[in-house]
Structures are given as structure tokens and as C-alpha cells.
Amino acid sequence: MPACLAASALSIVLVGCSSQVEGNPSVSKSLGRPDSTAVPSPPRELGFASYAEDPCKLISKELLESLGYDPSGTVGTEEDGLAIEYAGRGCYWTSNEDPEDFLAINLQTSNSQGGRGGLSERYRFYEAGGYAYWRATQVDEYPAAFFDLLDERAEGRCGIGVGIADDLSYSVVAQNYKENPQRACNVVKEIAGDALQSLKGAN
């Protein structure tokens, strides 16, 4: 993944990193016990199953093509460094028209293994000042929220996270929808829903 894309995708998946993030206070790895009432548990716990090694397969090629993305996708590698260490493996897709338009999904397997997993832990990160905004929602009855380190929704960037177990979640981010900023949030929610259907079918 090119460095600029890796950094952009990473900005939504970082949870509990002890280093300073520009524009946000430093938050230690241990944020305390998540408030279990802030984020509801999923109706049925899911896992990443066979998608853990190739998250690109989570999203249907038909949907990606309909949204104007190259459906082949690129799986994150160990060369992506922090994105793998703090989040887990992910995949990104670039637009057929503009390479600056990109879509990324990350499976928070490393977060879970490091005790930073689950949507409730992300909410704790938000309460500690780590995220610029938090807007609770649902994706097919599963707990979800729009959030990001910086609020760039007006510039056409949006991120969403979905909880599939109390200690496991995944996130989707899209950016560069400058001509239609609201579309970014619509796109990430649609992609998150497609990923959820794939996970349900594998669990």
C-alpha cells in the first residue's frame, strides 16, 4: 500500500496507541474497562473466519464496480507496518477515475489480541479525546458508529466501525468525495453492510 494510503487508512483504526497523534491528546494503551452500556453487544457474535488472510474477498466485486472502484483490491502487507501492528490485515481499493479516491477496510484482529478490541473500546478512545466525533448507528442490527481521528466529513472523508463481537470489530474508511461529501458516509455504511453479509455467511 502506498504510504499516503496506509497512513489514511491507519488513522481510523488506531486505538490505544501510546504515541501522540497530531491534533489529539496522547492516549495510553490501557484505557480502562469499556463502558458496556455505551455500545450494545452484537445480536450474534461473528469472526473473520476465512477472510482474515484476504479481506478483499469480503466485498462483492459487483458492489465495488457500481461505486466506481477497481474491484481487484490490494491486501495490506507487513510492509504497512503500524496498520498491521495496531489493527490487523486490511484491503484497499482505488477509484477507476481518480487514484486519490480510495476505500479501505481493516479487520481489528491485532486490536483484539492486544486487549484493544471491540467497538466499546473505540468508544472509550473517543471519550478519552482520541476521536473527533462519534455518531452511533447500526448496520443490519449490529452496533456501529461513524468516527475518525479528525472530522473531515465536510471534505468528503468518512469512517465507520462495526462490532461483530464484544472484543472484535472492523472499520471502513472512504475519502476524497469532495464534490459530494455526504456520499462518503453513505458509501462506508454500504460497504460495511456488504462485509457483514459475507461474515454472516461464513459463521
Image (tube, grey):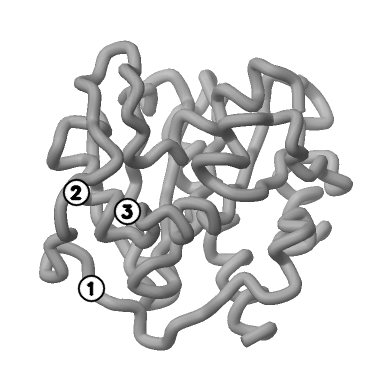
Q: What residue sits right under mark 3 in the picture? A: 145
Q: Residue furthest right?
A: 72
Q: What residue sits right under mark 2 in the picture? A: 124
Along the viewing direction, whichever of 41 and 64 lies nearer the viewer: 41
How many numbered tags mark residues here? 3
* Quarter of the C terminus within the rendering: bottom right
Task: Residue at 78%, 58% (x, y): give it.
Answer: 54
> Residue 68: in sight, yes or no?
no
Residue 129 position in % (x across, y down) = 17, 31
Q: What residue sits right under mark 1 in the picture? A: 40
Q: Compute the Cα span from label 3 to label 1.
A: 11 Å
Among the two numbered marks 2 and 3 on one chain, the one whose residue lies closer to the N terminus: 2
Residue type at mark 3? Ala
Among the two numbered marks 2 and 1 on one chain, the one whose residue lies closer to the N terminus: 1
Determine crowd level at label 3: few under 14, some 14-19, many 20+ residues with C-alpha closer than 10 A. Answer: many
Residue mark closest to the camera, 2 vs 3: 2
Residue type at mark 1? Pro
Q: Secondary structure at mark 1?
A: loop
Residue 86 position in % (x across, y down) = 50, 41
* Quarter of the N terminus within the rendering: top right
Residue mark closest to the camera, 2 vs 1: 2
Residue 190 position in % (x across, y down) = 55, 57
Q: Secondary structure at mark 3?
A: strand
